[in-house]
């Protein structure tokens, strides 16, 4: 293999490059990315980096790797031009510029894009948050103060709510779900987060539907289904993402909600592997098809896909992990969190919670809030598929 192309200039793509060179691959290596700059880290965009941008500082530590890192690894950067198509028979990536890039091996790491939204279509001045450029736009709106309405109480929406209220912005969150982050956390933990946000002054309108929206001058008016009218100086729509697979539609690659991959992250085309948010694969531990949109998964799959491409295939079955930081709550989540699963709280204090999710009595996931010392045991319980009863009967360890 002499020509490897990585499409997607972000976390999973950079991790793949790292692993390819670390394993001794010394052929041509090209990174194709739609965004113009060097790959950067997204999680700070709703947290510390957003605070700094609102305060008028430019965060200088967002780059995943400095420019010299790509030079040292002899990576040809083709940034600012998206891939527009893939010819799997001819082993060529077609760029939007009309150029083609040939490969022997291809890593697809095009991640997620914002879910299309009718609110965004109707109201061109509202904000969404996926890229550094989005964060700059949102920060400029928050700098003016006033009232921020967050539509969508998912992770990104609630993180921005926490960041904005700490900056003195008045914040209202609206979602049709009964509690914040309900898809991951369910009613009990979702209610814990609702209280946390309300204690800090965020108005959480869950469940609440939006009946009508209108732009009046520089403000946005929401008529809620319950009859209340709220007026926003700035709006963030955070209703999730979808996999960035539009450019692969005519490629013949097996697609669904993501690129359909085998457990070793190979795709349906020879010489093509995939990694990160864009991947859907069957996870052996949970016996179900997953697509995970979190940082650790992108890093781990990038490395794993690189190894597979270089001829060392193995099933990717890591216990998933993600975090969210809101106020002083350091939240670490492991395994599967699904509304279909049962939730049992193992320990709870004013500041910390340890809870596990289970199905048919078998532990599948865990949430540790301000409880870092419980993480290893929870990870082992998930990997070993232990009975939730065993954990409930064990004496709670100090967190
Ligand atoms: C604001 C925010 C906060 C987050 N906070 C957390 C957190 O606290 N914890 C956590 O675990 N995760 C968090 N995440 C999620 C995490 O950042 C993602 O899971 C991770 O970035 C996924 O990496 P990826 O490389 O798979 O995809 P992405 O980061 O989506 O990158 C894909 C790249 O591919 C490019 N691309 C897309 N299509 C094409 C194309 N056709 N041609 C070329 N390039 C293309 C995109 O422009 C993008 O640069 C957060 C995400 C956001 C946006």
Image (cartoon, rainbow, N blue to C red):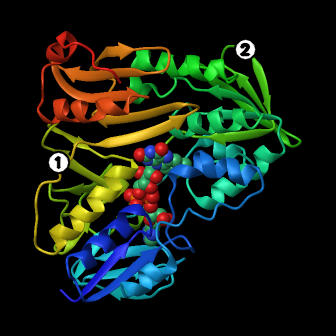
Picture quadrant where residue 153 is located: top right
Label 1, secondary structure: give it.
Answer: loop
- Classify 10 Å Cα crowding around label 2: few (below 14), some (14-19), many (20 and above): few
Which residue does the image show at 69% across and 52% down from the upper left?
A: 52
Identify the residue under disc 2. Answer: 227
Alpha-carbon neighbours of circle 1 within 10 Å: few (<14), some, or many (≥20)? some
Q: CA distance from mark 2 to mark 1?
A: 48 Å
Question: Residue at the top extreme?
Answer: 393
Residue found 33% across the figure and 75% down from its top: 86
Q: Is residue 243 among what the camera can see?
A: no
Residue indicated by mark 1: 317
Count of number-bearing discs: 2
Q: Residue at x 47, y 38 (%)?
A: 324
**40 in relation to 199, above or below:** below
Q: Position of residue 72 (x, y in %)?
A: 39, 85
* Residue 283 located left or right of residue 248: left
Which label sits in the foreground, 2 or 1? 1
Task: Using the image as rendered, state which of residue 250 and residue 189 is in the foreground.
Answer: 189
State ligand 1's quadrant: bottom left
- Is disc 2 in contact with disc 1, using a CB cutoff of under 8 Å? no
Q: Residue at x 43, y 74 (%)?
A: 84
**Is residue 342 something that shows in the picture?**
yes
Q: Is residue 113 left or right of residue 261?
A: right
Residue found at the very far front of the displayed protein = 398
Instruction: Return the residue nearer the eye: 391 or 206.
Output: 391
Q: Position of residue 122 (x, y in %)?
A: 69, 44
Mark before the other along the chain sequence, 2 or 1: 2
């Amino acid at each position: 293999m002499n020509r490897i192309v990585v499409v997607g200039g972000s976390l999973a793509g950079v991790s793949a490059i790292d692993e390819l060179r670390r394993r001794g691959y010394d052929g041509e290596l090209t990174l194709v990315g739609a965004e113009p700059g060097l790959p950067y880290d997204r999680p700070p965009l709703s947290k510390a980096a957003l605070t700094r941008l609102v305060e008028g500082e430019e965060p200088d530590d967002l780059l995943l790797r400095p420019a010299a890192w790509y030079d040292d690894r002899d990576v040809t950067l083709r940034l600012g031009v998206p891939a527009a198509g893939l010819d799997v028979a001819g082993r060529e990536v077609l760029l939007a510029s009309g150029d083609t890039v040939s490969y022997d091996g291809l890593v697809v790491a095009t991640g997620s894009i914002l879910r299309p939204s009718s609110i965004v279509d109707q109201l061109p001045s509202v904000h969404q948050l996926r890229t550094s450029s989005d964060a700059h736009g949102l920060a400029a709106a928050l700098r003016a103060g006033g009232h921020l309405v967050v539509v969508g109480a998912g992770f990104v929406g609630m993180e921005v709510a926490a960041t904005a209220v700490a900056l003195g912005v008045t914040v209202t969150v609206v979602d049709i779900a009964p509690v914040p982050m309900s898809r991951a956390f369910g009613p009990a933990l979702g209610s814990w987060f609702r209280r946390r946000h309300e204690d800090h002054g965020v108005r959480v309108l869950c469940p609440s539907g939006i009946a009508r929206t209108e732009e009046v001058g520089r403000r946005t008016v929401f008529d809620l289904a319950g009859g209340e009218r709220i007026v926003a100086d700035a709006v963030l729509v955070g209703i999730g993402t979808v996999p960035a697979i539009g450019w692969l539609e005519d490629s013949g690659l097996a697609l669904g909600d993501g690129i359909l991959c085998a457990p070793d992250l190979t795709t349906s085309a020879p010489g093509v592997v995939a990694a990160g948010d864009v991947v859907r694969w069957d996870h052996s531990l949970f016996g179900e098809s997953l697509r995970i949109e979190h940082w650790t998964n992108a890093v781990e799959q990038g490395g794993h896909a690189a190894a597979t491409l270089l001829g060392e295939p193995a099933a990717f079955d890591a216990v998933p992990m993600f975090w969210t930081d809101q106020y002083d709550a350091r939240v670490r989540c492991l395994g599967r969190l699904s509304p279909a699963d049962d939730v049992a709280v193992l320990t709870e204090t004013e500041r910390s919670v340890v809870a596990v999710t289970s199905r048919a009595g078998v532990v599948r996931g865990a949430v540790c809030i301000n409880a870092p010392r419980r993480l290893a045991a929870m990870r082992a319980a998930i990997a070993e598929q232990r009975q939730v009863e065993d954990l409930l009967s064990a004496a709670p360890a100090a967190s």
